[in-house]
Amino acid sequence: MASLATAASEKASIEAFRRDVIDASKTMLVLVDFWAEWCGPCKTLTPMLERAVAANPDRVALVKIDVDKNQTLASQFRIQSIPTVYAFLGGQPVDGFQGALGERELKAFIDRLLAGAPLPAAEADAEAEITAMLEAAEQANAAGAHEDAAAMLGTLARELPERENIAGKFALTLLALGQTDVAAQALAAVPAESKDGDVVRARAAIALAAEAVPVDDLAGLLADVAAHPDDHQKRFDLAGALLAKGDRDGAADALLAIIAADRQWNDAAARTTLLKMFEATGLDDPWSIRTRARLRSVLFS
């Protein structure tokens, strides 16, 4: 932590500010704390700032400016009340606040700014390696080499358990390999409220797997449904059998037929399953967009 409180002269203070704030902010986030010895709220805020910096010393620095001893700097920044904190990135002030924030508010303020701050060289190199491996896994999945993709993503998931997106991609790849139980384990540590797209897709696919029940005599089931068109349970069983076979369109046809006949049947089970299919496929997938349009047509016809 740099300090300007004991600068010997106005010129030295300005030079120190240029070095410790302007120049330093080109490689990290710099928080400038305008304070004074007589300021009560400053004594509350400064320790929180110091803890925040200590938690991330490679990316955040704190510079304290005593306004009584650095009146020129205080005047240049139009400091009218203290504490006042300015945040610098890229040699420029990018945000700030007045008064003493709470610990949680301060953390949110810093985290938001760090999202736009440059990474240290070592972290940038590591992030580039992670990105390259994720791209390689994506290419392997696209080529059908799911085992190779699973090996890469499994390694990343073990090394970076906090990355929800990696856990989601790993689970989807395991699902492509038919390893539903292992995919569920891969998501066990991911918070239930996660909004990561791949996590949502994987969880929906895992839930669908329980409903995708193969049957030995699919032709017989098709004939049975044709003979008893009002038996929604048989048609629902058919949807599950078609899902297990990988016939997504056939399963959707069966579910839409149930919804058209009785949308509330079995606590709206057909619509619930169809929505899971959308989530598992991806809401932006062309199949989902097309089939959701069919669902809207049924619901509002």
Image: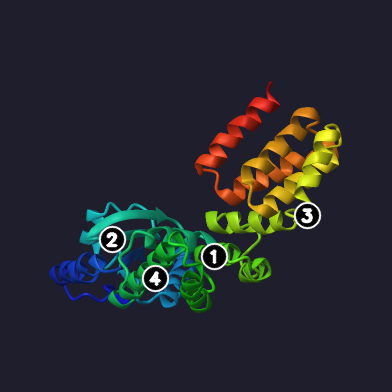
Sequence-first disc among 4 and 2 = 2
User: In the structure shown, which secondary structural element does the residue marked by tag 2 occupy?
Assistant: strand
Mark pair 2, 3: CA separation? 62 Å
Mark pair 3, 1: CA separation? 25 Å
Is residue 280 or residue 55 the one in the foreground? Answer: 280
Quadrant in which the C terminus appears: top right
Query: Which residue is labeled 3 in the image?
Result: 215
Query: Which residue is labeled 1 in the image?
Result: 173
Residue occupying image coordinates x 63% and y 65%: 178
Sequence-first disc among 3 and 1 = 1
Of tags 2 and 3, which is closer to the observer? 3
Query: Which residue is labeled 2 in the image?
Result: 89
Mark pair 1, 2: CA separation? 39 Å
Farthest residue toward the left? 11
Amino acid type, callout 3: Val
Residue occupying image coordinates x 35% and y 71%: 59
Q: Position of residue 279 (x, y in %)?
A: 61, 48
Residue occupying image coordinates x 19% and y 71%: 19
Amino acid type, callout 1: Thr
When asked about the image quadrant of residue 110, the answer is bottom left
Of tags 4 and 2, which is closer to the observer? 4
Of tags 3 and 1, which is closer to the observer? 3
Amino acid type, callout 4: Met
Q: Position of residue 62 (x, y in %)?
A: 34, 71
Q: Residues within 10 Å of mark 3 (few under 14, many from 20)?
A: some
